[in-house]
Image (spheres, helix red, strand yellow):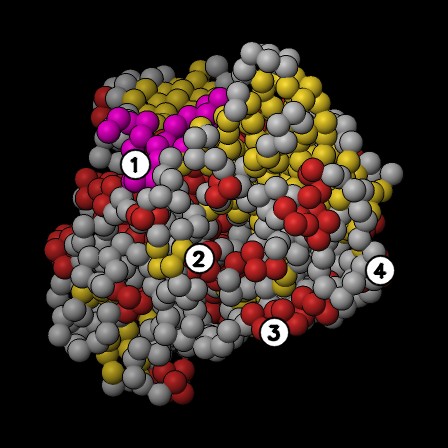
């Protein structure tokens, strides 16, 4: 196994595409290889595997079967072209090709391809590519999401004659239309019946025809324009009827069909009637969703010649449809090239030396994370939801902590997305300070029986990191609405921060042991239900060691923000409360680890069982003494060991069920890698590597999830399905949608930044690496830095003009030597101690200021 291939399991190989971006070449033949099959634990066995496409507005999935399904979050979560084989709706994103002389037809539906055809499938940054070579014709098809805010997907198709005779061909571009709401699922109930009802009520009656002004096919609902103008109150279901379009991009159209029955007819999916005889059949509307699009183009190819075709597909508000189509331009090749150039510019270039494949995985994770962003019209902001089964099966954007933890790395890589994630969360906060557990439908506020105690901390942490990194003081003065957005008592961001502090300290409050109360959950949503203690007692008496240890770090970070904002009293108060919480956590030491807390005043949890969640924060904050920290590292390493990565729970005889499945959780293990590195850098680095996709694929090579994307957690080696993910007996299953959880991508990035020791401060920036080697570099967004034994070089940008102080912990080769520090090529004054150097550096928007220490 070489570096380029590590590690694709049985499913394919990693490679670099023409743009130099990471890509996964999917090589498994799921039709013939029984290892492709997996148990969804909800819908039975499946051989369907899929990849995420996306930009800052939309998300789509492209499958190993060749079809692509588009998701929109903008006015409520819904699929635009849901794949429904039983109804003859096959999602689309597919090319058909018909030979005029022989009448033979084939398509990019993998199941319908001739067995002798050569097929290549590639999952790339922003695209899905399938190349089919059959009967001396090569069809190279790319479906991609244009970088930025486009609501439309694009197809870029090249047909080549690789034979020796001239061929007359017809290309068919197929996209279906089946809008399907993802209304909030109720645990224990199958939500599809209700979703079918709301979707039928909203979307039956679409009409479709050729539209001369667009130069393509348009499906429009009679109520479409009106539904976008009526100010509906927030609710659990999407109520608007968007336009759905399929338009050529720089491509001639000779025939078209806009009704599903006419597209497929007697020929069915394998040989559609609408391809053989394009009838220009419009759809007048009806009682069901009956629209499907097929655009046909006829051409002749001499030997060696090729034909380029392009198409756009998607859903838009009716008043914006024409502008959306116009923005696609008329050159699909140029649009795809610019999208690849944009992704190449925004993903980080990281070199951690020893394992070159880590660079690829971090770039891939940066793509997956940002492409998982969506825009919500009700909140007027972007969000980074958990994704996966929560969003795409359950229909809920759950856990504000998820949005904000996902956004932490975007502070450096895409600060505009990080700022919007904070705005989104502030806008789902009530004026009393309660942050919704989940956002559903058109912006409905849902607690879903959980009122966790950690939401305020994640908001404070994200805002602190964002403002300190970008120097964007003006953000603190921006007015942001409370819920329901966008017009409920707007207040400046700084006031939102103060409200979050008060809510955490006063409304959530602390219990008799001085720990933050657990309420109905902390990070762990199941910690209360697993406790066996009545819920009202937990609410009144339960305390969380996890959240209290985390609060030590968060309040220290907020103190830095307050100092930067010119609020010294708020800074002093935050630091004092942080130290008070640190003392309370120290009292939870049980000889070799911290306890988990109390679920009632007389029910201690974790005095002998080892719960991993709070342990990393004790190491990160340095609240343990040296002997305790070393003991804790040994305890975690010994008791939580697993072939994949550290497990979240180790039995100590308290007769408790392993919490949340007892396996590996990205959201916890990223902080573990950070915490371990403060004591033992080699162990921290190994934990970082253990939580990569490559390591999961190497450990469990026949499980497709965990290769290019993954769930939020994996079951441990002693489970009945090791390496797979959880499924609830209440009828909700992560296993049923086990990819696109953004933690699988945000946490390697977060951990990389933490291990690199990159930390913005009130004065500027501090870099104190925790890596077990000295040669490394990070180049992404606002920051570039490279460490060598005899030099440190970097570039630093910001969103506001300021002179900042940069403090660096020196590599060993520079310690105790006379240093030269240059800023923007000019030697500058610096303060040097034995192992650090600090200097001033001007920063501002639009460029990164270079510096060098030799």
Answer with left or right where residue 817 lies relative to residue 404: left
Q: Mark 1 sits on what residue?
A: 7
Above or below — where is 297 with respect to 240?
above
Answer with left or right where residue 713 lies relative to residue 419: left
In the picture, the disc for residue 222 is: 4
> Label 4, label 1: how many angstroms apart (C-alpha)?
51 Å
In the picture, the disc for residue 737 is: 2
Residue depth check, mark 4 versus mark 1: number of the one nearer the observer: 4
The quarter in which the C terminus is drawn is: top left
> Label 1, label 3: how many angstroms apart (C-alpha)?
41 Å
Above or below — where is 513 with respect to 776?
below
- Nearest to the observer: residue 468 or residue 673: 673
Whichever of callouts 1 and 2 sits on the residue coming sooner in the sequence is: 1
Question: Which x, y percent locates residue 540?
Answer: 39, 84
Question: Which x, y percent locates residue 306?
Answer: 62, 18
Please tell me whether mark 1 sits on a helix, a strand or a loop: loop
Residue sitting at x 35%, y 35%: 12
Please tell me whether mark 3 sits on a helix, a strand or a loop: helix
Residue sitting at x 53%, y 47%: 61
Question: Which x, y percent locates residue 600?
Answer: 30, 84
Residue 470 found in image quarter: top right
Residue sitting at x 31%, y 48%: 34
Whichever of callouts 1 and 3 sits on the residue coming sooner in the sequence is: 1
**Is residue 83 among the parts visible in the rendering?**
yes
For the record, the magenta segment spans: 1-25
Labels 3 and 4 touching (C-beta < 8 A): no
């Amino acid at each position: 196994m070489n570096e380029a291939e590590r590690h694709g399991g049985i499913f394919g190989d990693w490679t670099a595409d023409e743009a130099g971006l990471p890509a996964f070449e999917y090589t498994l033949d799921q039709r013939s290889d029984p290892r492709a099959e997996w148990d969804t634990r909800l819908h039975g066995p499946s051989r369907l595997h899929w990849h995420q496409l996306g930009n800052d507005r939309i998300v789509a999935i492209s499958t190993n079967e060749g079809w692509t399904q588009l998701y929109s979050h903008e006015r409520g979560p819904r699929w635009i072209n849901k794949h429904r084989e039983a109804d003859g709706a096959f999602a689309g994103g597919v090319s058909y090709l018909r030979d005029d002389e022989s009448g033979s037809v084939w398509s990019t539906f993998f199941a319908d391809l001739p067995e002798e055809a050569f097929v290549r499938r590639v999952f790339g940054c922003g695209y899905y590519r399938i190349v089919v070579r059959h009967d001396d014709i090569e069809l190279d098809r790319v479906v991609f999401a244009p970088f930025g805010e486009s609501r439309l997907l694009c197809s870029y198709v090249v047909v080549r004659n690789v034979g020796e005779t001239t061929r007359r061909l017809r290309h068919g571009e197929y996209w279906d239309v089946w809008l399907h709401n993802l209304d909030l699922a109720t645990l224990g109930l199958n939500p599809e019946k209700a979703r079918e009802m709301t979707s039928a009520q909203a979307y039956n009656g679409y009409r479709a025809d050729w539209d001369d002004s667009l130069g393509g096919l348009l499906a429009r609902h009679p109520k479409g324009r009106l539904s976008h103008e009526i100010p509906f109150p927030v609710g659990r279901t999407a109520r608007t009827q968007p336009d759905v379009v399929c338009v050529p991009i720089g491509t001639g159209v000779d025939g078209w069909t806009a009704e599903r029955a006419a597209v497929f007819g007697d020929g069915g999916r394998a040989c559609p009637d609408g391809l053989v005889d394009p009838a220009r059949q419009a759809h007048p509307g009806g009682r069901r969703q009956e629209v499907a699009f097929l655009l046909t183009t006829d051409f002749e190819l001499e030997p060696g010649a090729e034909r380029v075709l392009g198409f756009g597909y998607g859903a838009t508000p009716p008043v914006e449809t024409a502008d959306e189509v116009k923005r696609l331009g008329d050159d699909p090749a140029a649009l795809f090239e610019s999208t690849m150039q944009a992704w190449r510019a925004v993903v980080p270039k990281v070199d951690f030396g020893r394992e070159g494949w880590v660079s690829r995985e971090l770039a891939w994770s940066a793509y997956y994370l940002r492409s998982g962003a969506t825009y919500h019209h009700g909140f007027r902001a972007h969000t980074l939801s958990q994704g996966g089964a929560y969003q795409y099966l359950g229909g809920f954007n759950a856990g504000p902590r998820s949005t904000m933890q996902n956004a932490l790395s975007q502070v450096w890589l895409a600060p505009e997305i990080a700022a919007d994630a904070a705005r989104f969360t502030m806008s789902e906060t009530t004026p009393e300070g309660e942050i919704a557990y989940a956002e559903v439908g058109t912006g409905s506020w849902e607690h879903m029986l959980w009122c966790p105690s950690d939401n305020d901390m994640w908001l404070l942490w994200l805002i602190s990191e964002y403002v300190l990194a970008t120097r964007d003081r003006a953000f603190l003065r921006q007015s942001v609405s409370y819920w329901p957005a966008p017009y409920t008592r707007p207040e400046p961001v700084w006031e939102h921060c103060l409200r979050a502090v008060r809510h955490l300290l006063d409304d959530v409050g602390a219990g008799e042991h001085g720990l933050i109360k657990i309420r109905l959950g902390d990070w762990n949503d199941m910690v209360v239900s697993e406790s066996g203690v009545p819920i009202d007692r937990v609410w009144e008496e339960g305390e969380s060691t996890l959240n209290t240890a985390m609060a030590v770090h968060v309040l220290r970070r907020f103190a830095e923000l307050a100092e930067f904002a010119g609020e010294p009293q708020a800074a002093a108060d935050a630091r004092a409360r942080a130290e008070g919480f640190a003392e309370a956590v120290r009292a939870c030491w049980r000889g070799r680890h911290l306890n988990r807390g109390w679920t009632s005043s007389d029910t201690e949890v974790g005095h002998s069982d080892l719960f991993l969640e709070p342990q990393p924060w004790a190491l990160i904050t340095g609240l343990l003494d040296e002997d305790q920290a070393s003991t804790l590292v040994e305890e975690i390493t010994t008791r939580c060991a697993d072939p994949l990565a550290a497990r979240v729970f180790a039995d100590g005889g308290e007769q408790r069920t392993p919490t949340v499945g007892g396996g590996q959780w990205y959201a916890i293990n990223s902080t573990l890698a950070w915490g371990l590195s403060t004591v033992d850098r080699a162990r921290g680095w190994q934990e970082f590597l253990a939580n990569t996709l490559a390591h999961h694929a190497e450990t469990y090579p026949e499980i497709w999830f965990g290769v290019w994307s993954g769930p939020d957690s994996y079951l441990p080696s002693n489970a009945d399905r090791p390496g797979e993910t959880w499924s609830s007996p209440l009828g909700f299953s992560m296993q049923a949608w086990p990819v696109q959880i953004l933690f699988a991508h945000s946490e390697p990035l977060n951990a990389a930044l933490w291990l690199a020791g990159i930390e913005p401060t009130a004065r500027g920036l501090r870099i104190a690496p925790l890596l077990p080697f000295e040669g490394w570099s990070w180049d992404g967004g606002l920051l570039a830095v490279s460490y060598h034994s005899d030099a440190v070089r970097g570039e630093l940008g910001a969103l506001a003009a300021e002179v900042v102080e940069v403090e660096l912990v020196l590599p060993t080769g520079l310690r105790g030597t006379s240093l030269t520090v240059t800023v923007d090529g000019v030697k500058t004054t610096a303060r040097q101690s034995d192992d650090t150097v600090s200097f001033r550096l001007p920063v501002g928007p639009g460029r990164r200021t270079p510096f060098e220490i030799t």
